Image: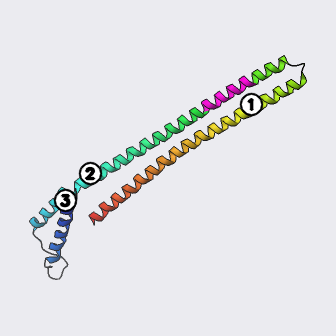
Amino acid sequence: MADKVLKTIEAIEEFQEKLDNKNTLMFTNSVLVKKSEFVELLETIKYNLPDEVMKCQAFMDDMSAIHLRAQAAAKSCIDDAEKRANDMLEDAKRKAEEIVSMANQKRNELLDQNQIVIRAKEYAQSLQARSESQAREIIENAKGIAMSSLNSTMNELDQAKNRLRQYMSNIERLQK
């Protein structure tokens, strides 16, 4: 690859040198050149340059594919995190309902003992509050994991964009 780039640069430099060394036509800035000299140089440039252009296009296609995969992965990660969070919340609600139901059952059995009934209600409320708190924690953790994954994916995309810009800048410098 470097060899082709060097050949292309050398052909361009030779092209410029020949133009600089030609005598100008009287009273104009025009020069008279042999067509065969320049056709050969242009053929060399044409032969070597498309390889670089094709590599750039392949790189652009790769970047586009990476971007699409990253979007799909991010969406999948968010969907998975939301599903897990919802499942955890449903499980926590179900457990809380079971606990409340058990507490209510216990309360009904002990109606005549006022102090025990009060304690059972407090216990059920405490368990329900803890379950809801744990469910919120689980949801927040799942969201954090999803955001971390998205941020990581975005960082990878940014790095890939930077590499693409650098590669395109190198190509532009070579074309000048």
Q: CA distance from mark 3 to mark 1?
A: 73 Å
Residue 93: which quarter of the image? top right
Instruction: Specify whether residue 87 is painted magenta.
Output: yes
- Name the residue that disc number 3 marks: 3
Residue at disc 3, secondary structure: helix
Q: Position of residue 17 (x, y in %)?
A: 17, 73
* Dot label at residue 127: 1
Q: Which mark is first along the chain, 1 or 2? A: 2
Badge 2 crowding class, 10 Å Cα cut-off, few under 14, some 14 to 19, many 20 or more, is few
Residue at disc 1, secondary structure: helix
Residue at left offset 57%, top offset 32%: 84
56 to the left or right of 74: left
32 to the left or right of 53: left
The residue under label 2 is which amino acid type? Met
Residue range (magenta): 86-99
Q: Nearer the viewer, residue 33 or 150?
A: 150
Residue 125: which quarter of the image? top right
Q: Nearer the viewer, residue 138 or 63?
A: 138
Instruction: Specify whether residue 25 is painted magenta.
Output: no
**Height in image: 4 above or below 133?**
below
Residue at left offset 40%, top offset 45%: 66
